[in-house]
Image (cartoon, grey):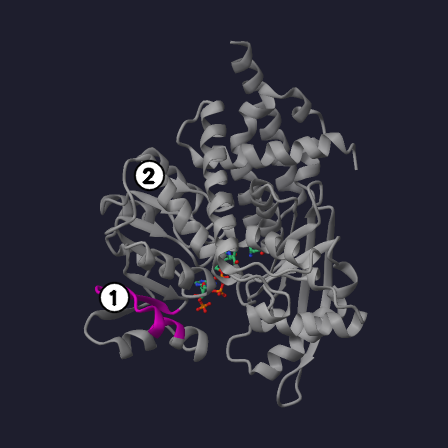
Amino acid sequence: MTKRRDETRTTDTLDRLRAEIEDRNPAQPEFLQAVAEVLDTLAPVLADRPEYAEPGLVERLCEPERQIIFRVPWQDDRGRVHVNRGFRVEFNSALGPYKGGLRFHPSVNLGIVKFLGFEQIFKNALTGLGIGGGKGGSDFDPRGRSDAEVMRFCQSFMTELHRHIGAHTDVPAGDIGVGGREIGYLFGQYRRITNRWEAGVLTGKGPGWGGSLIRPEATGYGNVLFTAAMLRERGEDLEGQSVVVSGSGNVAVHTIEKLTALGANPITCSDSSGYVVDEKGVDLDLLRQVKEVERARIGTYAQRRGASARFVPGGRVWEVPADVALPSATQNELDGNDAAALIRNGVKAVSEGANMPATPEAVQLFQRSGVAFGPAKAANAGGVAVSALEMAQNASRTAWPAVRVEEELARVMADIHTTCRETAARYGSPGDYVTGANIAGFERVAEAMVAQGVI
Ligand code: NDP
Ligand code: 2IT
């Protein structure tokens, strides 16, 4: 009874706080969405642990420690000057150096970077590997740019960013539009400016110069392992299940690879031009040739694949019936209508490879319909977990074999799955991975923030 009263009181406090945050951060809908999704689940833990409900703790958690915005001028191949905007939001370092990727996409703005940095705090806490939360990027559009243009952009971006980062301060990595090529150019410029071979300043490096094996694979592999763990709780496994995957970048490709290895049948992939459905299962070699080697559009896959594949311009993969759905492209790519279509078609599990791909309405529909739902903070934490393992290898000047990294990744994902389940059950929401992930991540950060005082 008292507990319920405490919970009502904390819910009122959280509602007030949410209104204040909305006032203070206008025109940042994605950030406000990410904050609301977390605050909506914290009432039970704040009622249970009064020290975390102390005035100011949640407010501090929702305000970045530091936000850096800078000009990024660069010249294209014809000598024309372009001016982009660069961002790094250093959100929370209670558990370790700021850690999180860089996104290069025309849609990037401060609100997007803040939403991603906020998510990263909880995700990184869930890994248990001692990393704080941050994110960065630019509204630069790499599409159609030559390697030389991308290199000049990365060099200009790092010319400013270098003064803010470091192996013990802030460690960026990749995200949308930033993969091995970009990390290479960024690392080269950092090394040149600082005259330091400081491998631990960036993760996602090439395996010959400080990168960890399995880092490129880790996010997609991790999400598939998390999905398999959710299915196991229901007495099922992935073998023979049909899977709709969105996206065709780093996360999607390695999701498809692991699904195939485990005997599942990934039947779709997509990009912003539309999607491909391939009845025989996506041909990974062809997909990589089209997207990674040629950097072409996804329709090219269907043109070359033959009768089993069809390109649907402008469509969304969620209209294709499947047992499992793994959104792996971008935020808010799966809305209430998409969720309803998936549920109508009998989907059993949905797990977020991308960050915040399902809208709040979609998440609610899945949960109400008894679909197993893996939230991004837990399900896609494999990427940043292996980034932390890359930092460990760099610090000890060693390189682990792929099997060791894969074993560690599997251990971390299993641990996150168990932690989310146990936490959800402890707070009265058994099977609710959203509540489990938010509260478990929050507890770890809150404990460190309380111990370290008001800073
Ligand atoms: P990539 O750049 O490799 O691939 C992104 C894919 O998503 C492309 O197919 C792209 O299509 C599509 N996409 C991007 N933006 C949009 C958009 N606005 N509308 C429609 N499609 C879009 O990125 P990643 O695979 O690395 O990242 C995918 C998601 O996974 C992101 O949400 C990212 O934050 C998240 N993530 C990534 C991790 C990593 O380790 N890389 C770790 C954890 C999460 P197009 O080329 O047409 O734009
Ligand atoms: O969203 C993410 O977790 C990432 N883009 C990976 C971050 C990292 O530092 O590896």
User: Going 68% across and 41% down the picture, which residue do you hit?
Assistant: 95
Q: Taking the image as drawn, is residue 135 in sight? A: no
Q: Relative to 278, is 50 above or below? A: above
Q: Position of residue 216 (x, y in %)?
A: 51, 62
Element under disc 2: helix
Query: Callout 2: 10 Å neighbours few (<14), some, many (20+)?
Result: few
Q: Position of residue 107 (x, y in %)?
A: 55, 63
Identify the residue shown where x is 32% and y is 74%. Answer: 301
Asked if residue 119 lies in the magenta stretch, the reply is no
| SS of the residue under disc 1 | strand
Q: Which mark is residue 77?
A: none
- Which residue is at the front of the view, 399 or 334? 399
Q: Which mark is residue 278?
A: 1
Q: Is residue 333 above or below residue 282?
A: above
Q: Quadrant of the C terminus?
A: top right
Depth check: give the residue in front, 81 or 167.
Answer: 167
In reply to whether residue 279 is colored magenta, the answer given is: yes
- Count every numbered label the image shows and give the total: 2
Q: Which residues are magenta?
A: 273-288
Residue on which the image places disc 2: 232
Query: Which quadrant of the figure has residue 198?
Result: bottom right
